[in-house]
Image (tube, rainbow, N blue to C red):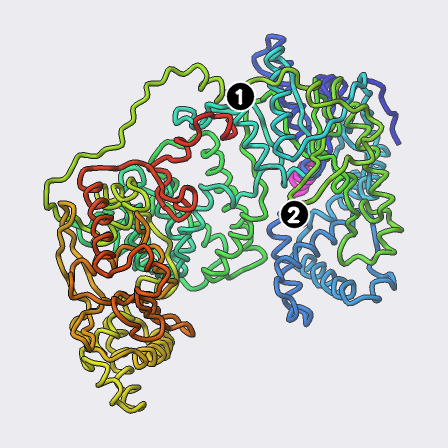
Amino acid sequence: MWAPTEQAAMYEALSALQDGVTVITSTRRLARTLGRQHDRWQAQRGRRAWPSARAWQWSDWLEQLWLSMHLSEPGESPMLLNRLQEHALWEQAIRDTPEARELLQPSDIARAAHTAWQVLHAFEISLESPHWRRSPDSRAFAVWSKRYASASANGGFLDHARLPTVIAESISQGRFPVPPAVLFVGFDEWDKQQQHLVESLRASGCVLRQSVPREQGKHAVRTAFADAYEEVSAAAVWIGNRLQRQSEQVVGVALAGLDSYRPVIRSCFEDILEPGAILPEAFGEGSCFDISLGRVLVDYPLVQTALQVLALVHEPQALGEMGSLLRSPHIGGAEREMTQRALLDGQLLKRGQARVALDSVRRLAGGQQTQAYHCPILGQALEDLQQQASRLPLHQPAAAWAMAFSQLLHSLGWPGERALSSDEYQTAQAWDKLLQEFASLSCVLPQLTYGEALQQLRRAARGRAYQAEAPEVPIQIMDIGEVHGMRFDALWVLGLHDERWPPAAEPMPFIPMPLQQQAGIPGTSAGQVLARAVATTERLIGCAPEVVLSYPQREGDQRLAASPLINPIPAISVKELLNPWPEAYARQIWRHARLDHLHDTSAPPLALHTRARGGAGVIREQARCPFRAFAIYRLGARPLGEGVPGLDRAQRGALIHQVLQDLWSALASQAALRRLSKPELTRLTREAVKQALEDAGLGERFGKLEGERLIALIQEWLEVERARAPFEVLATEARREFTIGGLTLELHIDRIDRLSDGHLAVIDYKTGDAAIEAWFEERPEEPQLPLYALVLGDDCAMLAFAKLKRGQCSYLGLCAAQEAGPGLAALQGSKWANRHPSWEGLLATWRAHIESLAAEFRLGNARVAPKNGPETCRTCALPGLCRIAEINATDPQSSND
């Protein structure tokens, strides 16, 4: 079919480009690389202008051929569909069939059927074979295919699956001129469609050549690492060493499974080769490495923001999505209202609504100017957005929706007020191209609702792989499949373990297996996959003078071994490969740093009898960690929290408090409780619950569910109250001021009872777990009840947690004299009696401990000193403020450098 050449592929391709030969490559990366090298070659020869390199990836070349034929015969050729239009036609073909009723994700099935249709034509498999009738999947696909083909013919459309065949026929008929010479680079397998097209070119007089890579001097080694992180880090170090010695090199990194390695690749290569990338002044600067096969467009923040804005117009958004949009730098006023919008996000979290509507955010943002979260720029933009959305029609073509989407985004100031980096600018251009392609759906989907149009646009963004163009860089990172035809000064191949290389066979869905095997479709059988992997491994070893093959020995809990395909390669230890291992940048900085140590653990003291907000919480947090008490109650530091649908724990607790307060206001004593019949008690409970729910402003449906839960819980709790020794309720939700250690605390006591002997009992409601062991520690983490006992003084004879939890309602507490009911033990006879033989002595101990903690807080003791070490820090939301991790990491080597 052609005469193979003996020169190295890359140099022959460049020479061919100089002679005006059309060069066709197997991958876009290879075409782009050839184009750049061609331009550099011309510039080195002193030329100021030259024709663009005629280097095309196969499918791009076919589109160019079709375009030239279409222009030469206007009106006579069908319309070539783009990929989005093809997918929409496939969805239509599937949705209109009985089989579609059983499909959960018709769009995903359409994508798989679309791929099978392309393979069907590439290997010229007939739909008339009896094999298609032997399984439900293949029968359904045959039906869908005929419907799709019929819709294409009726619309006068041509898809990419049939494009090579149509071009081959047109070439044979002499309908347009063919290039005089074509060089194919990077091809090792040809499907039947490609073969027929190539034969048509040859028959028409075109000179065809295929570049066969010449193997470079083989110097390959293999090595193993503990895990993928260590493996990628070593590759980055090895490459950095090479480029330091000789910067004019191109080093390749190939991976078996790039997608799974992508996050660790970017992290390690930036940390090791570009440590300054995290600095603000590095924003928008180029990188020394390029990762191939970019993420899908929807993963880019600029596009995420655009889709979030368009979704907000359509329906209420999840709380997390709304927060992401508010904090986005890609809407108008983001720089000027950064702080206010973060506070607005916090306000939404406090409200706890599962989904947030556009109107709700608009009213909050543009509401009272006295609110810290007032965002006038955002409020006005949201109002403009809402008004513009209200004028949209119910149905219109995709092209009209594309224009409307652009206008909606413009009204909210997308893509933002700050200057875009080069990558962001290119992403914005990619979004515009996506909208243009989306607009072309008008040909196949005449009318769409807003929701349907947004769904199509979102799906298109999810299916569009995108990578910003970058200057030529010395480190090229790519999937193994892209290496063919490329040449490097050195190459490191990662991830060659036995579970991934050779890869598993992946037969095509929908196409019967006998037809796949007869046609020789790649990936059909294990033997075929193995043969391809062997050939690919040989090519990898031959495409650079120095090649390192590596694999991780563990992935999670799974042990891995070297791929059997690389076992013949000589092994080398990591120490031999990287000797010496360079010192990490963080370690070098630390070693050369000149530090002044300042131990500042004290805040300005408070004046005597200063009133501290927070009540017993001040003592609790001072006991847990002095810095946490200082941060929360003097600096006002608070986490934003997390929104939950319905009521959070604090709101549920407040409802219980209000219901019990109303009940005991009506009952006043246990005797009155016991006198009530069950129906009377139920009626009283329902009235109290109804009033509490009305005050909370819950919706009817949710309020009914919450009300039933509350009624059942309160009735269960009142049975526990019946079992206590007699008491009267003196006060509920009582507020007291108490000065201790020079600090005045505002306390809120849930309930105070009078016992039958005239003494008082203090009760604290708990809806979660409760324990009294912490009362007896020198730094008590549950100081509320001991503190309340000091407020009541000698009259107090009982402290108790009232645990209100369905199925676990109970008292847990301590009495001065005798047991007062289940869970209310007397001090004498308890495990604490040896240390505290008398109630008076226990109160004196508590006074000393709490007084010490109050004095610490007043005098400004703000040490970062968690009481129980990491266990205390585990539940703390302020580690970024106290920086305890940095304090503990006295040696940077201990924190991964």
Q: Position of residue 73 (x, y in %)?
A: 68, 42
Q: Which residue is disc 1 drawn over?
A: 584
Give the Cα distance between marks 2 and 1. Answer: 54 Å
Around disc 1, counting alpha carbons within 10 Å, would you say few (fewer than 14), some (14 to 19), or many (20 or more)?
A: some
Q: Position of residue 577 (x, y in %)?
A: 70, 19
- Tag on residue 634? none
- Tag on residue 80? 2
Q: Which callout, 2 or 1, points at the residue further toward the start of the chain?
A: 2
Whether residue 75 appears in magenta in the rendering, the answer is: yes
Q: Position of residue 596 (x, y in %)?
A: 32, 18
Helix, strand or loop at label 1? It is: loop
Report which quarter residue 567 is drawn in. Answer: top right
> In the rendered image, which quarter contains the N terminus?
top right
Cβ–Cβ under 8 Å for marks 2 and 1:
no
The answer to whether 312 appears left or right of 471 in the picture is: left
**Residue found at x 58% / y 35%:** 264
Q: Is residue 207 visible?
A: no
The answer to whether 430 appears left or right of 282 in the picture is: right
Amino acid type, callout 1: Ala
Amino acid type, callout 2: Leu
Q: Is residue 501 visible?
A: yes
Report which quarter residue 256 is drawn in. Answer: top right
Q: Position of residue 120 (x, y in %)?
A: 78, 52
Report which quarter residue 563 is drawn in. Answer: top right
**Residue found at x 30% / y 48%:** 778
Around disc 2, counting alpha carbons within 10 Å, would you say few (fewer than 14), some (14 to 19), or many (20 or more)?
A: some
The answer to whether 326 appears left or right of 425 in the picture is: left
Helix, strand or loop at label 2? It is: strand
- As drawn, the residue found furthest toward the left would be 608
**Residue closer to the observer: 8 or 174:** 8
Q: Which residues are magenta?
A: 64-80
Which callout, 2 or 1, points to the residue nearer the camera?
A: 1
